[in-house]
Image: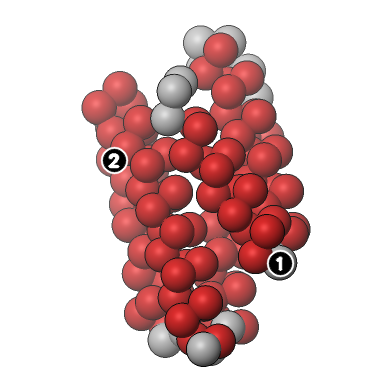
Amino acid sequence: MWNHIVIAHVSYRCVRAGYKPMGYLGYLTTALSLLYHRNNERNFIVAEGISAKLCIALLVYHGLQAKLSKANAILPSALVFILWRLSQRDYERWHPWMHIVVAADVHYFLWATERARV
């Protein structure tokens, strides 16, 4: 559960960078994910899944709006989707990496959009 801190951190960075809906949705996703894991993956599965996928959709949308190339806007999120599919087969092995990859994806997005503005 410790790796949820990286998602909370990038949510904070999104709010600070002006992507408030994405940041606040990231906070919500983090809270729902913590509740989901705390309850031994029995509760909050639907709400957490919808919230997480909306975050990824917003990430792609904002990337395209910021005039990033389609590859820069879509490919990192595609990696998250692949990890999500792998985690359905071997949850304990792949799911923790999703938190790290999502955070890296958002860090990359923030870096690329800041670079595109300059």
| Residue drawn at point x = 45 percent, y = 59 percent | 107
Q: Residues within 10 Å of mark 2 (few under 14, many from 20)?
A: some
Secondary-structure class at tag 2: helix
> How many numbered discs, if any?
2
Secondary-structure class at tag 1: loop
Counting from the top left corner in percent of width and height, residue 3 is at 42, 30
Per the image, the residue denoted by label 2 is 86
Say above or below: 63 vs 17: below
Given the image, on which type of amino acid does mark 1 rest?
Answer: Gly
| Residue drawn at point x = 42 percent, y = 39 percent | 99
| Residue drawn at point x = 37 percent, y = 42 percent | 100
Counting from the top left corner in percent of width and height, residue 33 is at 57, 29
Given the image, on which type of amino acid does mark 2 rest?
Answer: Leu
Can residue 38 be seen here? The reply is: yes
Residue placed most toward the observer, 99 or 19: 19
Per the image, the residue denoted by label 1 is 18
Can residue 49 be seen here? The reply is: no
